[in-house]
Image (tube, grey):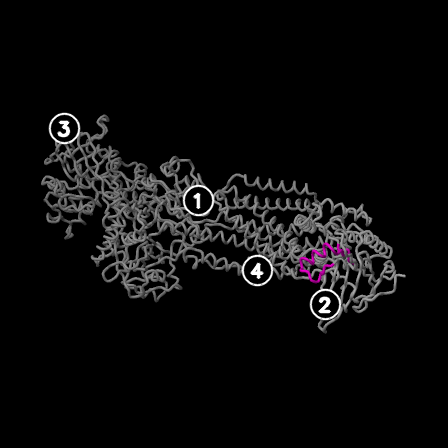
């Protein structure tokens, strides 16, 4: 036992159905999790007791809700039947794929029950789970004592586990003469008397072998058989219950044999439908491919004469109708080794090379592995193979051969030829024989060989994987999509805006108190004392403000989470996204915000106290910021340098690193924005020199410009605020996605209307008329108890399915790599694209590694790496790689394989997976059989009918049918949800900016009310006064927004997204922001509209 | 008669009731006449001046300047009236700190229709006439108090107003500067042939005017002659 607390389990995906009294489908969950466990699984005593002797099942709340059922109702479990022999090999069973179990729901586990969320795979959803007693599932599937999972709370059990593995766990047998002897008796010695009576062996042991096994007394007893096997069959045979020994294991065994200095031979046995020589035909014959070792033992040498090409030897049996002369052509007809759809027959010609004596001492029937339905049948006529078989073709001589020789091959070819003809991705040999190097095997050989062979096999190469679930979940929870760089980048502009606002408001506050400060200085206080006083005052306000801000930030975070949850296309976020604000983060936020605010306040108060005392006493405030002392030309040069630096950043080498990309994006934007402010500084100095004169509007504009330039620092701070906000909003917009409304061939949907995913593979795919037949057959089965309804549905669907084209893709399960998955995808789903789809082409590509008329042709290439396609966003944000880059995946043998991203889709349905060519897929994942992903191109308008046809027709396979347009929209909506969050930051920035403008405007009106009164006295109407003020601030607004917009464009234009930017929307956004700011100005000025300026002037 | 004032009354509503400021003032002045009004603080002098200049509205009464009734005008017409017919000089100069002396003088012309070159020339002439020909490109902060007030006088005259109103124009100046400003006002009044009404506390300055009236509790009466 691996660990006393370890729990054996069968955990697999299945379909749970609810069927009505007439056995018609009512509801189903297509991708449910089956957890078959013993009572020890439940650590809760009550549950454990209830589980004992349970004949029903328990559902978790998710499953019960999905099926809309409660306790005491029945569910039907549809599970893929296990099959030792690969179903896509020609000996595989392709007919009986799905097994059913009807179970009563005994209990529904509440959502709060910890077992209800049991899940081995990190993901967004709590899976719909059905818990079933382990023994029930094992019995139903016919896999008693077999499990596919061991759950343990302990780590470091790998070595222990490995030491407990036997060859049978790798589906291998290793049998020598002794084991074969015992096997024979185990099979036939029903009365266990260690003697095989005639009734026990007749028809089961080749008649020609019987005399050889008999003892001198004529009985076939254990000793006589043992003696025969040890003297005539002194070899060990490695075979597989999968019929074909997998290439990986064959290689390990070969290596070991070589290492131990043993002799060996590889054998590939196949079945020919016909052996033909002239008009003579022998049906259903076993053919063996043998290597030189075995050839030597049989006394033949196939490679003696190369010019004859493929050569064949016949077993020399008397009744054979085939009498070729050496050199004659012999035809072999056989089914291709891999079957997709119906088996395909092929014919090959051989040169007849000679006869091998029918000496069963030499040629034994055990050359052919056991195959239920063939080798266990008494007669040829009673064969029940999984391939098309016509027993009418059997003649008495064939039956005679079966009686005399049973599975002894009728013909022999060279092993290499056999491998070439009948080898497949599942294997190229059926057995390996191991012979002793000298006279016999040393004692303890079998145990030693098996131990060494086991030691050489890496369990992961056959799918035994140790998963540290805790580590895996923790690793996956390190979100696949790292937006921290972007958040920091965008927040930087927001923080900048907030700091500018702090500085601006504090400055306005101090300006009002300039005369107080001047008086205090005049009375003898030092600049330091006054600055310190102001700073302390500011600290108090900043401290309170930041505290208040922390509260607002928490509310904002809650709002963001709610926003994400509500915008997410499904409910998966509801359960996993929770507010998490550590106290340390709050402290850090407080300290940083407080320090930055105090720094802004310090700078402002320092400027104030350095102003001349008399100016202060008069209420003035020297505009003594950095720019004041600079000349316009110097400002222009500074601005130009910063702009060049910003533009230069854009030309840095492209990188897939998000942090670097974000740095480039925000660095270039930030520098462009700062340069814009320098240009504005120069502009303000320039407009200061424009003479204020003229008539009407011209004169008023000049006056407005002069007013704007009057308090440059204030104007620059205001413009800085606005530009930061505009940058945030505009810079995000180009990334916003509209789901592609185009559903044509070269769109994100590729012109396909539906996407179907099945839980259980459809072995022959759904392409062509046979696919439609499969669906209609499924419709029939789905209405088992109601033939009338079945007939009606079949008629209905037959019509709508006419003209529907289906492309079937192979599928290797894995993590959803799309943005719908917040967890990091460690092993993305992989699709194998068939040639038919590659030739059809279509879909929208963002980029390809090579320009090709049909980019899909790139999937053919595997030189030196296997080309792969992936959605651009998936690659960038989830996989964190780029076009032309390598990507490591694990193949079906646990080996690392490299892919090269050769094509990037844009806005496609393929956002959750990586696509490779089917041929490559089969090399990487030979164990994945059939098709589970289907693209449906329906010409008919009746899409919902077609959708229903696939749902019902493939219900046993657990089909999930989605409209491709919905899929694309779902992906786009997630991206937009993220972008809206970033734009939310921009909106806050805009609010801050607008608050700044409003504050500046209010201050302007207050401090300039006597000036406004004077203008009234000079004959300016209130309209004129408002117009002057409005123009002054509107221009500032325009320039601020303009600088932000231009800076955003500098950041955005070099990006690919720029090409798909909705410039109209951007212009509207810009106009909207300007209008919003203008409205704030108008609202501020509205308050002074009715003011009596003269009264204000008089008060002064 | 160019300026006719009839029964001008002005009351302020306070918490303790109605407070009369101007109590039925009558005044007639010809176009080239000047007048000094004296009175104690709060006697209603400035209010009367603001009413004459269209900056404030009386409770009742009538004003006619060259036949125009500013009290019957709309807000826009009244602003036009202030711009075209009235020139103001306040106790504080109220020069815009962001504009040069010349630009300050030109401010009222922004609303007019005079050709640009002509108005600039006029402003320069006026500045020359007030003795600021060398200071026209200076900022107000670079001028002395007297110079600022002279600039304000020039600004008041740029539109060649029919009525020049000066509300204690020398209140912030020393005696010498005050006299200079007052003489300047009178000189320009004679040159421009407009009506000049000056409010002042100073008896000495009032003596410079041919006609002096006194305001006492809202009642305007002829004072002693200048002699």
Numbered tag placed on residue A325 in the rendering = 3
Q: Position of residue B197 (x, y in %)?
A: 80, 59
Specify start and end residues of the magenta stretch as a single range. B67-94
The chain ID associated with circle 2 is B
Q: Position of residue B198 (x, y in %)?
A: 81, 59
Residue topped by disc 4: A550
| For discs 1 and 3, the disc positioned in front in the rendered view | 1
Mark 1 or mark 2, whichever is nearer to me: 2
Q: Nearer the viewer, residue A692 or A854?
A: A692
Q: Which is in the foreground here, disc 4 or disc 1?
A: 1
The answer to whether A113 is drawn above or below residue A163 in the figure is below
Q: Is residue A70 magenta?
A: no
Which quadrant of the view contains residue A843? Answer: top left
Q: Is residue B87 magenta?
A: yes
Which residue occupies 50% across, 60% down?
A: A558
Residue A500 left/right relative to A39: right
CA gap between label 1 and label 3 equals 64 Å
**The disc numbered 1 marks a residue on which chain?**
A
């Amino acid at each position: 036992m691996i660990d006393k607390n370890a729990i054996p389990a069968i955990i697999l995906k299945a379909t749970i159905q609810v069927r009505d009294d007439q056995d018609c489908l009512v509801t189903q969950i297509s991708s449910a999790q089956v957890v078959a466990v013993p009572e020890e699984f439940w650590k809760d005593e009550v549950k454990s007791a209830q589980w004992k002797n349970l004949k029903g099942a328990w559902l978790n709340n998710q499953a019960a809700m999905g099926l809309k059922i409660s306790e005491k109702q029945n569910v039907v479990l549809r599970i893929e039947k296990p099959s030792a022999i690969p179903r896509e090999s020609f000996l595989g069973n392709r007919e009986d794929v799905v097994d059913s179990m009807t179970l009563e729901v005994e209990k529904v586990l509440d959502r709060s029950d910890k077992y209800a969320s049991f899940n081995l795979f990190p993901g967004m959803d709590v899976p719909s789970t059905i818990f079933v007693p382990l023994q029930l599932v094992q019995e139903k599937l016919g896999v008693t004592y077999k499990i596919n999972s061991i759950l343990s709370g302990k780590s470091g059990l790998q070595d222990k586990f490995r030491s407990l593995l036997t060859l049978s766990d790798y589906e291998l047998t290793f049998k020598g003469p002794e084991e074969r002897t015992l096997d024979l008796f185990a099979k036939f010695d029903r009365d266990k008397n260690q003697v095989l009576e005639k009734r026990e062996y007749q028809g089961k042991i080749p008649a020609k072998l019987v005399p050889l096994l008999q003892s001198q007394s004529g009985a076939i007893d254990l000793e006589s058989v043992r003696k025969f096997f040890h003297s005539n069959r002194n070899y060990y045979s490695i075979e597989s219950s999968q019929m074909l020994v997998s290439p990986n294991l064959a290689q390990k065994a070969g290596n070991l044999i070589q290492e131990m200095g043993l002799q060996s031979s590889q054998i590939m046995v196949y079945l020919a439908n016909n052996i033909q020589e002239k008009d003579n035909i022998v049906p259903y014959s076993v053919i063996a491919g043998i290597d030189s070792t075995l050839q030597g033992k049989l006394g033949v040498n196939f490679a003696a004469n190369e010019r004859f090409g493929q050569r064949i030897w016949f077993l020399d049996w008397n009744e054979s109708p085939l009498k070729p002369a050496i050199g004659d052509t012999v035809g072999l007809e056989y089914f291709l080794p891999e079957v997709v759809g119906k088996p395909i027959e092929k014919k090959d010609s051989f040169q007849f090379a000679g006869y091998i004596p029918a000496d069963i001492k030499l040629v034994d029937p055990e050359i052919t592995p056991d195959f239920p339905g063939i080798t266990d049948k008494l007669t040829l006529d009673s064969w029940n193979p999984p391939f098309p078989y016509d027993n009418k073709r059997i003649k008495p001589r064939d039956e005679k051969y079966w009686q005399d020789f049973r599975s002894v091959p009728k013909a022999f070819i060279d092993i290499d030829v056999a491998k070439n003809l009948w080898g497949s991705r599942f294997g190229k040999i059926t057995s390996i024989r191991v012979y002793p190097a000298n006279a016999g095997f040393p004692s303890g050989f079998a145990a030693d060989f098996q131990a060494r062979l086991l030691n050489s096999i890496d369990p992961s190469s056959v799918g035994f994987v140790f998963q540290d679930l805790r580590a895996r979940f923790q690793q996956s929870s390190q979100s696949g999509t790292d937006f921290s760089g972007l958040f920091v980048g965008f927040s930087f502009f927001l923080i900048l805006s907030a700091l500018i606002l702090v500085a601006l408001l504090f400055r306005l506050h101090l300006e009002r108190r300039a005369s107080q400060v001047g008086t205090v200085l005049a009375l003898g206080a030092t600049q330091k004392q006054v600055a310190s006083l102001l700073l302390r005052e500011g600290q108090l306000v900043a401290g309170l403000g930041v505290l208040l801000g922390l509260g607002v930030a928490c509310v904002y975070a809650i709002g963001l989470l709610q926003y994400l949850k509500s915008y997410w296309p499904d409910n998966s976020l509801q359960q996993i996204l929770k507010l998490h604000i550590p106290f340390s983060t709050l402290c850090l936020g407080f300290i940083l915000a407080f320090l930055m605010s105090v720094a802004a306040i310090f700078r402002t108060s320092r400027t104030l106290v350095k102003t001349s005392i008399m100016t202060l006493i008069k209420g003035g405030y020297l505009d003594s910021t950095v720019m004041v002392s600079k000349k316009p030309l110097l400002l222009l040069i500074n601005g130009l340098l910063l702009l060049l630096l910003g533009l230069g950043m854009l030309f840095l080498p492209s990188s897939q690193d998000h942090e670097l990309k974000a740095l480039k994006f925000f660095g270039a934007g930030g520098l462009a924005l700062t340069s814009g402010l320098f240009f504005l500084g120069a502009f303000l100095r320039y407009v200061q020199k424009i003479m204020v004169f003229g008539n009407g509007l011209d004169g008023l504009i000049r006056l407005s410009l002069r007013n704007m330039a009057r308090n440059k620092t204030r104007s620059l701070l205001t413009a800085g605020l606005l530009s930061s906000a505009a940058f945030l909003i505009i810079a995000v917009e180009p990334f916003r996605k509209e789901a592609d409304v185009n559903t044509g061939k070269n769109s994100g949907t590729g012109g396909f209307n539906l996407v179907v995913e099945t839980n259980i593979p459809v072995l022959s795919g759904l392409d062509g008329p046979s696919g439609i037949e499969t669906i209609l057959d499924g419709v029939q089965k789905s209405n088992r108890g109601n033939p009338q309804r079945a007939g009606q549905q079949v008629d209905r669907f037959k019509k709508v399915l006419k003209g529907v084209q289906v492309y079937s893709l192979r599928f290797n399960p894995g993590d959803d790599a799309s943005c719908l998955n917040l967890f990091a995808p460690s092993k993305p789903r992989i699709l194998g694209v068939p040639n038919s789809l590659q030739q059809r082409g279509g879909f929208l590509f963002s980029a390809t590694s090579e320009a090709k008329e049909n980019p899909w042709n790139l999937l053919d290439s595997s030189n030196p790496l296997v080309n792969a396609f992936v959605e651009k966003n998936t690659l960038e944000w989830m996989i964190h790689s780029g076009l032309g880059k390598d990507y490591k995946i694990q193949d079906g043998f646990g080996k690392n394989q490299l892919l090269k991203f050769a094509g990037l889709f844009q806005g496609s349905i393929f956002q959750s997976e990586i696509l490779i060519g089917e041929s490559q897929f089969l090399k990487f994942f030979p164990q994945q059989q059939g098709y589970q992903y289907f693209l449906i191109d329906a010409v008919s308008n009746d899409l919902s009918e077609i959708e229903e046809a696939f749902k019902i027709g493939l219900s046993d396979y657990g089909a999930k049918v989605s409209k491709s347009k919905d899929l694309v929209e779902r992906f786009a909506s997630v991206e937009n949800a993220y972008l809206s969050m970033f734009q939310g930051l921009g909106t806050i920035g805009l609010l801050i900016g607008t608050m700044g403008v409003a504050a500046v405007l209010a201050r302007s009106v207050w401090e300039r009310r006597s000036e406004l009164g004077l203008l009234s006295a000079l004959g300016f109407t209130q309209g004129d006064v408002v117009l002057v003020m409005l123009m002054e601030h509107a221009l500032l607004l325009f320039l601020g927004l303009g600088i932000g917009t231009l800076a955003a464009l500098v950041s955005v234009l070099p990006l690919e997204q720029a090409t798909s930017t909705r410039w109209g929307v951007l212009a509207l956004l810009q106009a909207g922001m300007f209008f919003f700011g203008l409205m704030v100005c108008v609202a501020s000025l509205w308050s002074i509209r009715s003011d009596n300026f003269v009264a204000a002037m008089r008060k002064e | 008669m160019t300026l006719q004032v009839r029964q001008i009354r002005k009351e302020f509503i306070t918490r303790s009731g109605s407070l009369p400021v101007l109590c039925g003032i009558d005044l007639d002045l010809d176009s080239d006449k000047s007048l000094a009004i004296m009175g104690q603080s709060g006697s209603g002098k400035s209010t009367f001046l603001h009413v004459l200049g269209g900056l404030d509205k009386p409770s009742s009464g009538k004003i006619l300047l060259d036949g125009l009734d500013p009290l019957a005008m709309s807000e826009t017409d009244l602003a036009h009236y202030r711009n075209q017919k009235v020139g103001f000089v306040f106790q504080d100069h109220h020069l815009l700190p962001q504009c040069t002396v010349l630009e300050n003088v030109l401010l009222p012309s922004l609303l007019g229709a005079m050709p640009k070159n002509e108005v600039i020339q006029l402003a320069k002439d006026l500045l020359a006439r007030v003795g600021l020909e060398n200071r026209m490109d200076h900022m107000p902060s670079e001028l002395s108090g007297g110079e600022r007030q002279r600039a304000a006088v020039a600004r008041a005259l740029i539109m060649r107003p029919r009525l020049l109103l000066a509300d204690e124009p020398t209140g912030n100046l020393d005696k010498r500067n005050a006299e200079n400003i007052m003489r300047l006002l009178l000189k320009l009044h004679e040159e421009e042939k407009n009506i000049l009404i000056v409010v002042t506390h100073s008896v000495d300055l009032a003596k410079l005017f041919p006609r002096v009236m006194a305001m006492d509790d809202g009642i305007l009466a002829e004072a002693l002659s200048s002699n």
